[in-house]
Amino acid sequence: MTKYVTTASAAAIALALTPSCGWAQATSSNDSGLDEIVVTATKRGDAQNVQDVPFAVTAFGPKQLESQNFQGIESLSYVMPNVELDANNSAPGFANFAIRGQGIGGTIPTLESAVGVFVDGVYLGTNSGVVFDNFDLAGIEILRGPQGVLFGKNVTGGAVLIRTTKPTNTLTANAQVQLESGPQVTANATVSGPIVPDRLAAKLAVYYSRDEGYYTNRADNSSFGKQRTTIIRPALTWTPTDTVDLTIRYEHGRITGDGGPSHNLLDGRNTFVVNIDNRGFTDSKWDQVIGELNWDVGFGDGTITNIAAYRDFSGDTDLDFDATPFNLFNSRQKTLIDQFSNELRYAGTFGPVKLTTGLYYFQSNLFYLEHRRIIGNSLQGGGKQDMKTYGIFTAVDWNLTDKLILNAGIRYTYEKKDVLVSSIRAGGCDIDANTCVYSLTSKANWDAFTPKLGFQYYPSPDVQLYGFYARGFRAGGYNLRNTNPLVPPGPIDNEDQDTFEVGLKSEFGGIARLNLSAFVNKVKGAQRSVQTPFPGVGVAQVIVNAADATIKGFEAELTLTPARGLVISTFAGYLHGKYDKILYDISGNQTVGPEDLALKLIRLPPWSYGGSISYEMPVEDGKLTPRVSFSHRDKAFSTENNVGYFNPVDQLDFDISYSPNRNLTLSFYGKNMRDNVAYGLVSPNGVFMPGSTFGDLKEGRVYGGAIRWTY
């Protein structure tokens, strides 16, 4: 059994093994069998075997990401049960993630998420500027289910943990060049090594992508979807003693290009037509610095960790929202946000008890502006929000016997927000000058307790049964896109969720791994962004506590390694959701009644399932690894009134990789081979075009090739 220090997962290995993973396997054993997987999701001082973690998690190490031909988080959107990691390309880079039917649809930066995104332990405080290209990764972990004790607010659906690599104490280097349909060319390289052996190490990683545009704009027959991305990521690790290390990471990135790929569904739902008069633009840039200090202390054989971070992001996008060759409805959005956070925690062991406890602080300053040009009328608005969040948390795992563990934890969160709101109207703001005339000044505060109580039982060393109750919450707040004068922009109350989950994690003979989970989520005061056509502003979006709801489901993941080099996997997820009580008119018919209660929850496809097979075989002195995967996701609704919906998707991908030696890999691959039409957002787009619906297209069939070199 091979143990990887880097993050991997049962599902990741099931999805594909690359030649490099095979090399690691061959150096330790010539036998077939499952690899031991470790994750960092429990915030212990050391990584933990994924089969010993008492909740559902899927994770990917560097080689598994390579086998997916990974470029960004959205690349993983179809490879797990009950997980949607979709971008909302109406504002490129905006995340509309959903896990287990808990997610959002829209681009309001103050619309709180149900799936939190953390980069090197740092929470990204807005959904804007999340779904961009990424590289130089040590691992990605997708946590399904509420994570309120250790991660705080806005993780009722789950959390996405992204870890970049640390500087190494030995000289390492890697590079990759990738070419795919568009054409799009990407190149990245990383060099890492010691400056002072065992005391000071450094890393420099760089990334560049040039996309000439996947789509053709029928209005002028030009290529559409052009984009340029540049990322620079240096890092230093200082180890002054054998018990202390400090890692400082810096990142600068910029993306420029066209606006989102607008499609009007009046042109057909199953077509890649872009037919617009306004090309729009995207201009996003960010700078961030993260400092992580780890100190191994004698007290409880534990580790004190402090993660402090600052991030500054600015995004400016312009979009043809009517998605026609006529000048009807164009929209520009500008988001300026800076954030600072600090988490101080301790993880240690006291006999049969493992303890994790800490303090958390977060603050951000957000400035949002929007400019709508609707049939010659100019409407502007937006607002400012200053936010501060405080948290304290404790989690305990108590080994009652050799087979039974009690899990308990609690977190207290206090948050306050001060806002200035300028309703979207003529003269509300000046998006070029970054000034507004404010129509509302408000402040509010919220607090929440998020407890968890559960158990783990091991009838045998390779079988774990677990169960837990947990509470999570989405934070209350305000709507800075205030378009409906009949509905105030806030404050909105917290959304609370109580979850009950049971699961099984098991391995059989070193050649099969089966993980199962079943859950019930009870949601109170569900926050919803209700979209309706509205005279004068095109589309009105209000954020309200709209309903109480129940979501039930189950998940299954199976990995088989029946022969050396052969990996077969399958997964399945099922969701059923319904509204229990309606608190607001979400159908848009001006009344609250049975028609609201009968509506389906958004971003909740009943079934998601798939599988993959890969076979690593020796070829002369090298290795050849063909891999094919298929996944399906059912139809799901995009808007609360169920007018907008997402097509069902059947995703068929393949990859053929050849490694003539340990250092070089050549890969040819195809994505979305069935050429399915899929969208990140589907929304009605105005009262002036009856039946008109906006959709932001995802790419169809893509072919590509990659050359990867490692030293």
Image (tube, helix red, strand yellow):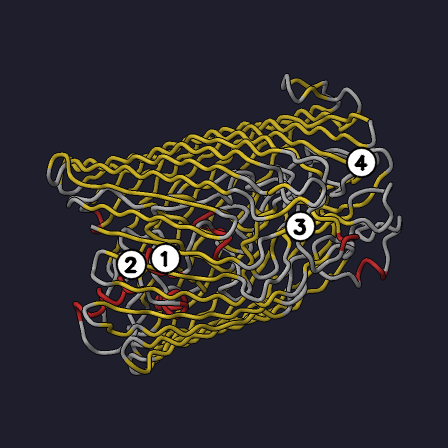
How far is mark 2 from mark 4, CA to CA?
Answer: 50 Å
Which numbered marker is on residue 681? Answer: 3
Q: In the rendered structure, are the residues bearing label 4 and label 1 in contact, judged by CB atoms less than 8 Å apart? A: no
Q: Is residue 525 visible?
A: no
> Which amino acid, mark 3?
Leu
Give the mark nearest the N terminus, 2 or 4.
4
Residue at image position (71%, 28%) is 371
Q: Residue furthest left?
A: 197
Nearer to us: label 1 or label 2: 2
> Which amino acid, mark 2?
Thr
The residue tagged 1 is 66
How far is mark 4 from mark 1, CA to CA?
Answer: 43 Å
Nearer to us: label 1 or label 3: 1
Element class at badge 2: strand
> Which amino acid, mark 1?
Glu
The residue tagged 2 is 665
Q: In the rendered structure, are the residues bearing label 3 and label 2 in contact, judged by CB atoms less than 8 Å apart? A: no
Residue at image position (21%, 39%) is 245
Q: Residue 343, image x and y in percent?
A: 38, 39
The one of 328 and 369 positioned closer to us in this rendering? 328
Label 4: how many residues lie within 10 Å, few (<14), some (14-19) or many (20+)?
many
The one of 45 and 507 positioned closer to us in this rendering? 507
Q: Residue 589, image x and y in percent?
A: 88, 51
Q: Tell me where residue 484 sits by quadrant.
A: top right
Q: Tell me where residue 440 sits by quadrant.
A: top right
Give the mark nearest the N terminus, 3 or 2.
2
Q: Is residue 32 visible?
A: yes
Nearer to us: label 3 or label 2: 2
The residue tagged 4 is 328
> Which amino acid, mark 4?
Leu
Q: Is residue 598 left or right of residue 364?
A: right
